[in-house]
Image (cartoon, grey):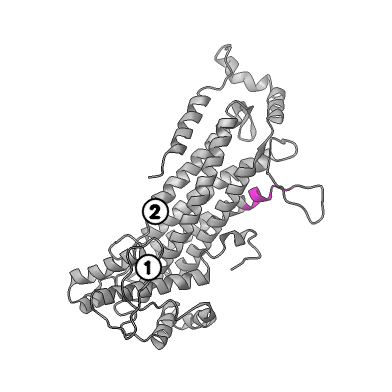
Amino acid sequence: MSDLLWPGDTRAAGLCTDEAVLTALLHVESAWLAALHHHGLTASSSASPHPAVPGSGPPHLAPDLSDLVDSRDLADLARDAEEGGNPVIPLVKLLKKRADVGNIHAGLTSQDVLDTGLVLVLRDAAARIREDLATQIEALAALADRHRGTDMVARTLTQHAIPTTFGLKVTGWLQGVLDARDALAAQDLPIQIGGAAGSLAAPTALAGSPAKARELVATTAATLGLPMREPWHTSRAPLTRFADALVTCTDAWGKIANDVLVGARPEIGELREGRGGGSSAMPNKQNPVLSVLIRRAALAAPPLAATLHIAAADAVDERPDGSWHVEWATLRTLARRTVVAGSQTADLLTGLRADPVRMASTLAEARPGIDAEQRRYGPSDRPYLGATDEIIDAVLARAAEKPC
């Protein structure tokens, strides 16, 4: 997958692609069939070990469906999805045609497979984002400590305010990234299986009792490595919370990018990217391209999350007519773009260059006006930096903690 109009999209590689979605849907169908087999509710003429999803529980003896459909079938599946409104319907038809086993998809509904498949895709994206957050935190902590004594001008409402240090400014960036880390760590996307209307009616009929139906779901969840949860067909908080966590990430990265863009202006010259981008017409330019692209993602993410909230608020009955459908591509786009922005932010921070001499010069030129507040509170032999060191130390201590 590539996107010519979203430069950097290739950083996300195979995450959230059509191929990834198809693989996830096949994992769900296979895991459910494995659960049926495990509980003695289906028979296969060619049983073979069913491989668990990475990070999942122990596999169960059942046919593996993942080899029956692959990327060569995507075009046909995409075309045929229009007839029933989702890609699971043609996928199930294809599996039943090609598999030498009964009870494929028995007890499930399309929403079970698609919701849980998307959860698997989002889980993979989140793992990548967490890696880049860790890189960002390490880089920011080092910058904050190294520049705790690098004096510079603080700016409020675009104007000079009071003296500060670049280390404290970076500490503010770090706090935003730590908030993003914690928000993402709090997400634990669960399995979503409820049958046709969220009542587990068909699984109960298959298994013989409600308790055994819930055991089927629990077994499937264990195989996929997902938390167990009661059906959430029309209670979309797991997805809106996840989207909000992604936006918390892009918000934090956007703030960093904005500050770098200001600091990299030639008339300010306090910051620069490790490797600037060129221009097709002006060879003298070294554009702060990473910051530009990160800011782009930060601007685009909130409307995508808003779409998911609108869809959740517009849900009706036991399967919404359109508001469920709008979630799929929206989630995929938001997650993939967040992955890209996370990688770009990690590169930006590991290569960021500060110019302490320029910072000091700007501060000197801002005097005596910038010291007005200090004079208001009386003369002092100490630099007017308040609790700067204590704040930096406290945030660095938080950065060293493991996320919840």
Which residue does the numbered mark 2 point to in the structure image? 187
* Image position, residue 236 (x, y; %): 37, 61
Q: Residue 401 is drawn in which quadrant?
A: top left
Q: Compared to 340, does 63 lie above or below?
A: below
Q: Quadrant of the C terminus?
A: top left
Residue 393 inside the magenta-drawn segment: no
Q: Which residues are magenta?
A: 287-293
Q: Residue at x 72, y 40 (%)?
A: 265
* Image position, residue 142 (x, y; %): 56, 36
Q: Residues within 10 Å of mark 1 (few under 14, many from 20)?
A: many
Q: Under tag 2, what secondary structure? A: loop
Q: Under tag 1, what secondary structure? A: loop
Q: Which label belongs to residue 52?
A: 1
Q: Amino acid under label 2?
A: Gln
Q: Nearer the viewer, residue 164 or 343?
A: 343
Residue 289 inside the magenta-drawn segment: yes
Q: Quadrant of the N terminus?
A: bottom right
* Image position, residue 48 (x, y; %): 35, 78
Q: Nearer the viewer, residue 115 or 138?
A: 138
